[in-house]
Structure formats: structure tokens, C-alpha cells
Amino acid sequence: MKNDTRSKIMSAIPSKDTSIELSVRKYLFKNGFRFRKNDSRYPGKPDILLPKYKVAIFVNGCFWHGHGCANDRKPKTNIAYWQNKIQNNIARDLKNRIELKNMGFKVITIWECELMDNPTERLERLIKEILDTR
Ligand SMILES: [Zn+2]
């Protein structure tokens, strides 16, 4: 496949949507939590890392991270290409989780679809999950 064709496909697919990460960060900040963003010193550069609570948070797009939910719509073309790409993402996510856990972090994953369904409920639960580790 030609490169311009591929980039056309890439742009047609909702990429890792930073707006969902932003909404989670905003909510935590408003509630007094301070955190690091995409800190490359930690496995997988967690979207949000709360050193004080030893919590790492990943905000995952359902397609890119292979959630398998209704929101995870696979493309109809180049199926092998996407399958391979997403399988690699899943494997990398798992490896990062294990490494973070070994470093003493609790790892929380927030899925894009959870924020679509009921963002308030999910974000309130997130705070409980963070505080639970103390
Ligand atoms: Zn999902």
C-alpha cells in the first residue's frame, strides 16, 4: 500500500484522542490532585501518574488498544495490518502494566467508552480507586 493511502486511512480513524485524556486531567486537577503527564521515566509513559499515591493511569482509546467493545470499530480494509498493529499495542500495554506493578504502582485503565457512557460516574470512581491505595 502506498504511504499516502495509509495516512488517509489513519486520519479517517479516530486516533488516540487527547481530549479524553484532557478531561480526566482537568477533573483530577480540579479535585486537588497533582500529577505528571507522559513522564518518559516510567514504563509506557502513563497519561497520568500520581507519585504521591503511587498510581499510574492510562486513558485508552478503544480502537488503538483493542478494547473489543461496541466503540471498538475495526476497519474493513487492511485487516491484517490493523490486527497486527493492535495486537502489538495490547502486548505493549500488558508489559507496561507489569513493569509498573513491579515498581509498586497501581495501574488504572480508563477506557474511552466508559467516559462516553457516564463520565461523572467513571471519574468519581477513579478518585475512589486512587484513594483506595493509601
Ligand atoms: Zn471500549
Image: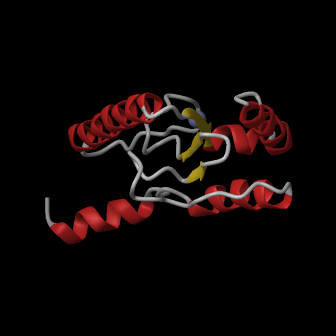
| Whole-percent x, y for residue 131 in the image | 77, 34
Hey, which quadrant is residue 35 in on the image? bottom right
Q: Nearer the viewer, residue 34 or 22?
A: 34
Up-down: is 113 above or below 33?
A: above
Give the image quarter of residue 109: top right
Q: Is residue 40 above or below residue 100?
A: below
Q: Position of residue 18 (x, y in %)?
A: 57, 62
- Residue at (72%, 44%) from the top-left corner? 115
Q: Residue at x 56, y 29 (%)?
A: 69
**Which quarter of the rendered picture does the C terminus lie within?**
top right
Point 67% across, 41% down: residue: 53
Residue 22: name its quadrant. Answer: bottom right
Horizontal relation, residue 80 to residue 94: left or right: left
Check the picture and name the quadrant holding the N terminus: bottom left
Q: Nearer the viewer, residue 21 or 43?
A: 43
Q: Residue furthest left?
A: 1
* Residue 37 location (% of width, % of height): 55, 61
Q: Is residue 91 left or right of residue 105?
A: left
Q: Nearer the viewer, residue 14 or 30?
A: 30
Colour mode of the rendering: secondary structure
